[in-house]
Amino acid sequence: MRILVVEDSNRLRESIVLALRRSGYAVDATGDGREGLEMAEDHPYDAAILDIMLPSLDGVSILKTLRAAGNRTPVMFLTAKDAVADRVAGLRSGADDYLVKPFALEELLARVEALCRRGYQKAASETTLADLTLDSTAKTATRAGVTLDLTAREFALLEYLMLRAGQIVTRTQIEEHIYDDLVSPMSNVVDSAVCALRRKIAMNEDSMPLIHTRRGQGYVMEARPA
C-alpha cells in the first residue's frame, strides 16, 4: 500500500514515515501543501494523511480540490484543533477520518490500515482466498493453517493482490503501490518479487496455484487451476 503524508513538522513527519515504512507501507512525504496537492493529483495513493495547517495551501483546501476533481483517495486529517466544530468541518469537507495531536503512532497505524481497507470496500481485517488467509492487522498470512514466513515487502505485495483478487494487476500498478523508489522500466524486480511470493505460498506440489500470469497484461489472484 502507498501512503501520502503531508505534514509540515519535520520531526513528526519523519516519525510517521518511519512507522509506516516499518509496517510495510510505501510512503511519499512533504511538508508543503501545494506540493502535497500535486503529488496527490499525480499518483494513485491508497490513503493520504494531511495536516490541516500547512505552508502555501492548507489541508482542507487540498482535500476540497481533490474531491472536486473526483479523487476518492481515503484521507485522514491531522490537527491540533480538537473542538467539535473543527472536527465536523473537517469531515464535512470530505475527510474520512480525523486525528487530534498529540496521538500515539499505534493509533495512527490502526486508522491508516482501516482507511486502506475502506478504499477496497473491506470492513474486516482478514481477507481469504481458498485456504489462504491474510490478516492486515496482525500482518500475518496463513495457508491451510500454516503461517507463511513473509518479508514486509512480500506481505505488502500479497495484501495488494488479495485485495484486488479476480482483477488483473499490472506491473506498473504494483510498482506504484508497493515500492518507495522508482523502478526502471527494464527492471524485472516485480516479476522476481511475484515469483518469490508464489514459491512461499505454495505449500506443496498439490497446492492450488493462486497467482496467475496474464501474458502482456500482469497478474491476477484467483483460486483456479493453472
Image (cartoon, helix red, strand yellow):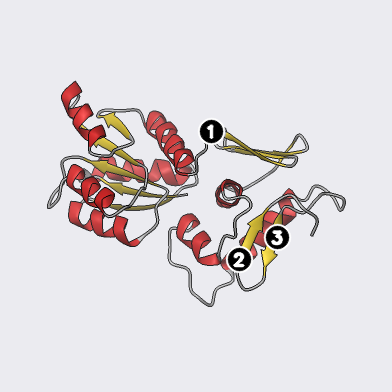
Residue 60, image x, y percentages = 19, 42
Residue at (55, 50) in percent of width and height: 160
Q: Secondary structure at mark 3?
A: strand
Residue closer to the observer: 5 or 217: 217
Residue at (22, 51) in percent of width and height: 65
Q: Quadrant of the C terminus?
A: bottom right
Q: Is residue 211 above or below residue 187?
A: above
Disc number lying in front (1 or 2): 2
The residue where tag 2 is placed is 218
For the residue marked with disc 1, what is the amino acid? Thr
Label 2, residues with CA under 10 Å away: few <14, some 14-19, many ≥20: some
The residue where tag 3 is placed is 212
Q: Is residue 124 above or below residue 18?
A: above
Residue at (17, 28) in percent of width and height: 86
The residue where tag 1 is placed is 137
Looking at the image, residue 95 sits to the left or right of residue 115; the answer is left
| Chain-order first, disc 3 or disc 2 | 3
Q: Secondary structure at mark 1?
A: loop
Residue 103, image x, y percentages = 31, 28
Is the C-beta separation of discs 3 and 1 under 8 Å?
Answer: no
For the residue marked with disc 3, what is the amino acid? His
Residue at (28, 48) in percent of width and height: 67
Tell me if residue 75 can be seen. Answer: yes
Tell me if residue 32 can be seen. Answer: no
Disc number lying in front (3 or 1): 3
Label 1, residues with CA under 10 Å away: few <14, some 14-19, many ≥20: few
Quadrant of residue 91 within the rendered picture: top left
